Image (tube, grey):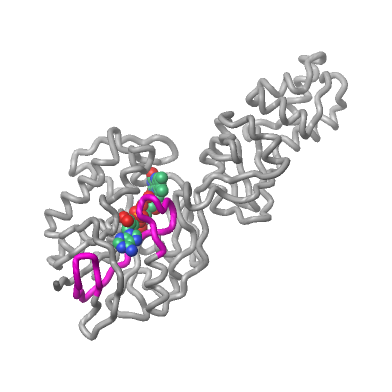
């Protein structure tokens, strides 16, 4: 079989690329080895797909080349995707921090993308894995589960390694290496952190305890959001965000009272409640079980009048910089994204085309561009897919 453009991966980036190429009159085939297309879109945002973020800028992306995403993000903006969502009459709302979610279901986003594919004459085949790819003088010869496909352009949209049970594979990285591209080391991002040994023992039974607002910090990077204790460690948006910046051995600190001068507050409490114990006072600002555990493990607890002001200032400083010794992450099993991937040095930032092999493109998560939590990763998938689809 012959086609102009063959796209490997019917996820967010692949389908968006297919629509753009199809609308230009190109004959497009999208193949995916999973039994259903757009599986990550379906499970995203708790089933409501956080499909973009109104505040997208290149600063919310991690990459060895922080400027690489600029061009594609500027040419296909959140407003372009919102226009598509509105054209299909999909109701949506802003949850917080510019994050846009469907009112009803992520299924509507997949339906919208497939309807646009159909309107642009694109063929989409699920249950169709790719075994081998060969370069030919005319383009590429690709051995798929449905036979040999000859394509002038080949777009690799096979995603990262996160959630293997959803069809994730390292195929895109292998293909990149096959054609001489560098692949930067990959690791799980937007992922819960684990504790081990005594650190895990001290906090394990707090599983389920949540703090609505903390600030997690690694070096100069900080995120203000919620935190959740789990059986194995820590999760919640503030942890997922900082996990992309955390590496083993990194100094992770958590400000447990980000909106307060904790030292001044404790000194005020000493005057107001001299007989109350520290753990009782802290239990008014933090979940009670956490306040108690922090006092047992780290701070000790006496009636407030027994503390000198300097001691309370010191305790306040400790609460604003709680050192957490994470032992690792939950890994690709639960990670939302894969950091690293196909080195952007080998790609054009305007078209996503390989600088080494004409007609070969890499888009979406397989590329070394990873967004923060909050709709940024889909926006990169849409924007990079569009950039390639306009030229492939
Ligand atoms: P994606 O992974 O979507 O698609 C790749 C496709 O390639 C898959 O369909 C796969 O089956 C296929 N494939 C792989 N290997 C293949 C092979 N050898 N042959 C054929 N096909 C192959 N982001 C966001 O912005 N907002 C959100 O709400 C969420 N929520 C979220 C929840 C969960 C649980 C996860 C795991 C992730 C998110 N994300 C997110 C991240 C987001 O889903 C992700 O960044 C994009 O789906 C990436 O789009 P791609 O098209 O690049 O890869």
Residue 236 in the image, given as x and y percentages of width and height: 53, 38
Q: Residue furthest bottom?
A: 137
| Residue drawn at (16%, 62%) of the image | 22
Q: Nearer the viewer, residue 181 or 373?
A: 181
The answer to whether residue 379 is seen in the rendering is no
Residue 146 belongs to magenta span: yes
x, y percentage for residue 347? 39, 73
State which region is magenta.
142-170
69 lies above or below 86 = below
Is 112 or 171 nearer to us in this picture?
171
312 sits left or right of 104 in the view: right
Would you identify the image quadrant in which residue 53 lies? top left
- Image side of residue 353 versus residue 149, left or right: right
Residue at horizontal 34 percent and vertical 48 percent from the top: 40
Q: Quadrant of the C terminus?
A: bottom left
* Residue 140 horizontal/vertical position (percent): 25, 77
- 201 in relation to 345, above or below: above
Evaluate whether residue 87 shows in this view: yes
> Which quarter shows the N terminus?
bottom left
């Amino acid at each position: 079989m012959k086609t102009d453009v063959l796209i490997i991966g019917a996820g967010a980036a692949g389908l968006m690329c297919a629509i753009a190429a199809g609308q230009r009159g190109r004959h497009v085939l999208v193949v995916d080895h999973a039994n259903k297309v757009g599986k990550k879109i379906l499970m995203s945002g708790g089933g409501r797909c956080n499909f973009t973020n109104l505040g997208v800028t290149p600063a919310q992306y991690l990459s060895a080349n922080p400027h690489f995403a600029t061009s594609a993000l500027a040419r296909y903006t959140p407003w372009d995707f919102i226009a598509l969502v509105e054209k299909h009459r999909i109701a949506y709302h802003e949850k917080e921090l510019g994050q846009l979610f469907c009112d009803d279901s992520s299924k509507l986003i997949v339906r919208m993308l497939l309807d646009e594919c159909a309107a642009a004459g694109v063929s989409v085949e699920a249950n169709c894995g790719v075994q081998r790819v060969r370069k030919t003088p005319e383009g590429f010869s690709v051995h798929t589960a449905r036979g040999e496909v000859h394509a002038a352009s080949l777009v690799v949209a096979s995603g990262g390694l996160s959630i293997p049970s959803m069809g994730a594979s390292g195929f895109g990285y292998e293909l990149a290496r096959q054609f001489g591209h560098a692949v930067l080391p990959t690791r799980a991002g937007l992922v819960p952190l684990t504790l081990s040994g005594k650190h895990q023992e001290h906090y394990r039974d707090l599983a389920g305890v949540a703090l609505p607002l903390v600030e997690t910090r690694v070096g100069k990077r900080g995120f203000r959001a919620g935190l959740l204790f789990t059986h194995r460690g820590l999760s919640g948006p503030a942890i997922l965000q900082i996990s992309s910046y955390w590496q083993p051995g990194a100094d992770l600190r958590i400000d447990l009272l980000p909106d307060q001068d904790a030292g001044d507050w404790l000194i005020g409490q000493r005057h107001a409640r001299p007989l109350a114990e520290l753990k009782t006072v802290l239990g008014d600002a933090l979940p009670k079980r956490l306040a108690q555990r922090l006092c047992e493990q780290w701070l000790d607890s006496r009636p407030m009048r027994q503390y000198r002001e300097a001691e309370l200032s010191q305790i306040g400083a400790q609460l604003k910089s709680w050192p957490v010794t994470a032992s690792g992450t939950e890994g690709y099993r639960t990670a939302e994204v894969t950091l690293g991937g196909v080195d952007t040095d080998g790609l054009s930032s305007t078209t996503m085309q390989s600088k080494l092999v004409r007609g070969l493109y890499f888009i979406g998560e397989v590329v070394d561009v990873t967004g923060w939590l909050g709709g940024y990763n889909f926006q990169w998938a849409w924007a990079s897919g569009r950039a390639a689809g306009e030229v492939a």
